[in-house]
Amino acid sequence: MKARILFVCLGNICRSPMAEAVMRHQVEQAKLTDQIMVDSAGTGDWHLGHPPHEGTRDQLDQHQISHQGMKARLVTPDDYNTFDYIVCMDTNNLRDVRKLFFGEGKATAEESKRLFTFMELLPAKGIADVPDPYYENNFPFVYELVDSGCKELLKRVKADLKLNE
Ligand code: 4NP
């Protein structure tokens, strides 16, 4: 396995499992499952062990993307060592994950490099956070953002792995 990607949101039932399933699907379509591994986790513990939210499952079903066996889990300090790309669905998630990994101390530029927000993949959208459909019930809009952002991430990972040459 050459690249490991972790998506992080708050509950790990709406946005990050959607990104995990969509990214895995795109990786499968690109025939890169032996090179790129995908997972997701949450910063909050309300839904541990639960499958993705019905709104997320609906979107994935509509696009024939599997969510079989997915279960919410917490992000852990060890995830920092495991994953090469830690993609936070909003800026609060990024702040919380930074704190978990680095405490109150400041991460070095090198340490911060693998941690970024999902919307950094889509700068032209001009929005900082993937909105939370748990509160906003805008699952189709979130799906479109997730699909576009995952395509950009796949391009970035392929370039990093020099798979485009
Ligand atoms: P997510 O959405 O972070 O996209 O999974 C949420 C899911 C559950 C809660 C908040 C956000 N909650 O408060 O239970």
Image (cartoon, helix red, strand yellow):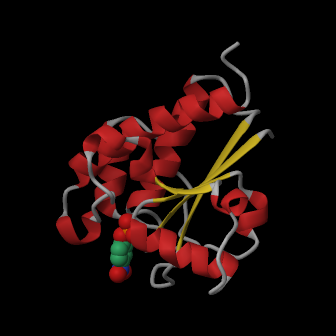
Q: Nearer the viewer, residue 88 or 136?
A: 88
**Is residue 55 in sight in this rendering?**
yes
- Toward which corner of the image does residue 82 lie, by quadrant? bottom right
Question: Which quadrant: the C terminus?
Answer: top right
The residue sitting at 27% across, 53% down in the picture is 127
The residue sitting at 35% across, 35% down in the picture is 63
Image position of 122 with respect to 137: above or below: above
The residue sitting at 29% across, 65% down in the picture is 132
- Toward which corner of the image does residue 134 lie, by quadrant? bottom left
Question: Which quadrant: the N terminus?
Answer: top right
Q: Nearer the viewer, residue 112 or 117?
A: 112
**Residue 29 x/y as whole percent:** 56, 24
Q: Quadrant of ligand 1?
A: bottom left
Image position of 126 with respect to 31: above or below: below
In the picture provided, is 144 more to the left or to the right than 112?
left
The residue sitting at 51% across, 84% down in the picture is 45
**Residue 159 x/y as whole percent:** 65, 27
Q: How many marks?
A: 0
**Is residue 66 in sight in this rendering?**
no
**Residue 87 x/y as whole percent:** 53, 56
- Toward which corner of the image does residue 10 lie, by quadrant? bottom left
**Residue 50 x/y as whole percent:** 49, 72
Outermost residue toward the top? 165
In the picture provided, is 98 more to the left or to the right than 140?
right
In the picture provided, is 33 more to the left or to the right than 127?
right
